[in-house]
Image (cartoon, rainbow, N blue to C red):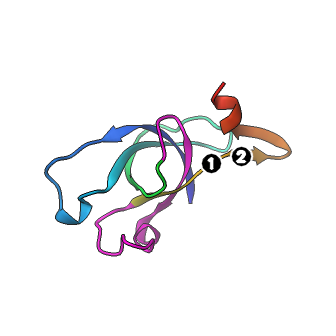
């Protein structure tokens, strides 16, 4: 899994029928210091993540293992909304602090 920040949403009216009802998010991955990495990826969301939240993203074949996604053509799936990230006894991210 990787950590990403939700940067926006993706809306598509014409798509594979298996993607109907799937919420698509524009994600930007985060490094170990909490800095945004260049580039974006679109991921399906099964947890109801919102703009600017940090999330855990499952990629590749693991993204299709989640219940209900076995037949969907997805490469990235948001599987959790992050509350905190710490590294070496240092707080890298806190959802509580972000909301202030």
Q: Residue furthest left?
A: 14
1 and 2 marks in contact (CB < 8 Å): yes
Measured from the top left, where is residue 46 in percent x and y? 44, 58
- Residue 54 lies, with reference to residue 97, above or below; the image says below
Secondary element at tag 1:
loop
Measured from the top left, where is residue 24 in percent x and y? 34, 49
The quadrant of the picture occupied by the N terminus is bottom right
Secondary element at tag 2:
strand
Name the mark nearer the viewer: 1 or 2.
1
- Name the residue rendered at 67%, 44% in the picture: 32
Name the image quarter holding residue 27.
top left
Q: Residues within 10 Å of mark 1 (few under 14, many from 20)?
A: some
- Asked if residue 77 lies left or right of residue 82, the reply is left
Q: Residue furthest top?
A: 100
Measured from the top left, where is residue 74 in percent x and y? 33, 62
- Asked if residue 9 lies left or right of residue 66, the reply is left
Which residue carries the number 1 mark?
82
Which residue carries the number 2 mark?
85
- Asked if residue 88 lies left or right of residue 83, the reply is right
Which residues lie in the magenta part?
A: 49-75
Q: Judge by depth and name the residue closer to the eye, 67 or 15.
A: 67
Instruction: Calculate the distance from the C-alpha at mark 1 to the C-alpha at mark 2.
Output: 7 Å
Q: Residues within 10 Å of mark 2 (few under 14, many from 20)?
A: some
Res. 49 mark: none
Residue 15 lies within the magenta run: no
Q: Judge by depth and name the residue closer to the eye, 62 or 48.
A: 48
- Name the residue rendered at 35%, 40% in the picture: 9
Measured from the top left, where is residue 44 in percent x and y? 38, 55
Residue 52 lies within the magenta run: yes
Q: Judge by depth and name the residue closer to the eye, 73 or 80.
A: 80
- Residue 81 lies, with reference to residue 70, above or below; the image says above
- Name the residue rendered at 51%, 34% in the picture: 52
């Amino acid at each position: 899994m990787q950590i990403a920040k939700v940067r926006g949403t993706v809306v598509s009216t014409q798509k594979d029928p298996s993607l109907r009802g799937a919420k698509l998010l524009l994600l930007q991955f985060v490094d170990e210091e909490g800095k945004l990495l260049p580039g974006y990826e679109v991921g399906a969301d099964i947890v109801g993540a919102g703009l600017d939240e940090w999330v855990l993203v499952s990629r590749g074949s693991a993204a299709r293992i989640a219940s209900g996604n076995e037949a969907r053509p997805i490469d990235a799936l948001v599987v959790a909304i992050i509350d905190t990230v710490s590294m070496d006894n240092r707080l890298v991210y806190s959802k509580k602090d972000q909301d202030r």
